[in-house]
Image (cartoon, rainbow, N blue to C red):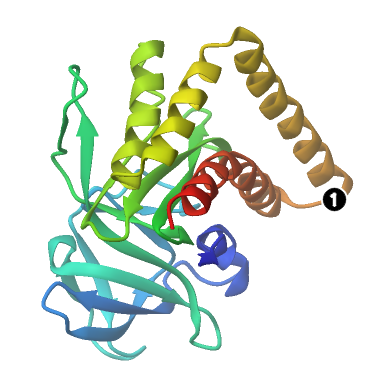
Amino acid sequence: MRLYFTFLLLLSMTFLYGQNQKKSAYIPVEITKTDGNRMNVLVSRVQIPKISTFKDVLGGGDVNTKTKIEFRTSESSPVEKIAAKEIAKIVYLDEGHEEAVSFEKLKIKEFDRNGVLKDADNDVFLSRIYDGKIGVYGHPNILCTKNGQVGPYRCEYTYSTFYLKNNGENFAVMPLDINLFDVQRSFDNFVGAFKVAGKDCPAFEKYLASFRGKMEDRNFQKEMRKGITEYKKQVIKQAKDNDLDTGETLDYISRKMFEYEAALYLGIVKEYEKNCP
């Protein structure tokens, strides 16, 4: 079993390759194609592949909705393109050409209004943060806004998204959708996702039933909200005390908040591993 938080390096790879580096500079990646072939190439700036697109991180400008990415085989070679549908995995490499962060393309399933698990419309590129009997994937969500037509973008951490995958399956399921305003359905989907990932394990299902009951407790809900609010205040204060610049502050807050939110999911997965040998 292995715990990953390295994907958050994507946020700081801007600094890894130098804050003053030109936007046109290329960084090394390893692309595994759907046919199994691998390519070691260079891509421009730092990009996150997500839902069949590639989204710039801290790159400024509008979100890139193209389904192809540009790459070079060397600094002096001509620019080429590859479609996201041709990619199974993309690995960003550090200065020593070791893996810094990777994204795997997974099929996604989600619950409909009747609680039936169905295929989602798109495959998603996800970064694995925990490798065990149940794999946990996730990423922080960053919202960038701009004041008028001129001036810098202001980016801030909003929340984290997580997915679960049984290591014997080829799909992942998302436990919590913040856009779902039906609280009871959210609770059911949260527990249901762990049941799907945990498969047939009576001891784990018993644990989940108990956890589902706890989710109804208003004091439990209140403490959860209070905990995350107070923790975020502490993290923001720590960033100020450490005199971090704008980019470093975003990276620090995102990393700390992601780790805090991931702890809930990892704790439940550990219960599965403890009760389901």
- Front residue of 23/197: it is 197
Q: Position of residue 94 (x, y in %)?
A: 53, 79
The residue that mark 1 highlights is 243
> Which residue sits furthest top?
218
Residue 152 in view of the camera = no
Q: Is residue 1 above or below residue 32?
A: above
Q: Residue at x 53, y 52 (%)?
A: 274
Q: How many labels does the image show?
A: 1
Residue 137 in view of the camera = yes
Q: Where is residue 222 in the image (x, y as percent from the top left)?
A: 65, 13
Q: Position of residue 34 (x, y in %)?
A: 14, 72
Is 223 positioned to the left or the right of 198 in the image? right
Is 250 positioned to the left or the right of 51 in the image? right
Q: Residue at x 35, y 74 (%)?
A: 43
> Which residue sits furthest right?
241
- Front residue of 170/198: it is 198
Assign the C terminus to one quadrant of the image: bottom left
> Which residue sits furthest front?
202
Is 96 positioned to the left or the right of 28 in the image? right
* Callout 1: SS: loop
Q: How crowded is mark 1: few (under 14 residues within 10 Å), some or many (20 or more)?
A: few
Instruction: Report which quarter residue 36 is drawn in.
Output: bottom left
Instruction: Report which quarter residue 87 is drawn in.
Output: bottom left
Which amino acid does the dot numbered 1 rest on?
A: Asp
- Front residue of 253/160: it is 160
Q: Residue at x 35, y 46 (%)?
A: 198
Q: Where is residue 237 in the image (x, y as percent from the top left)?
A: 83, 37
- Front residue of 42/237: it is 237
Q: Which residue is drawn at 44% across and 61% down?
A: 132
Q: In this view, does 160 lie above or below 103?
A: above
Instruction: Report which quarter residue 106 is drawn in.
Output: bottom left
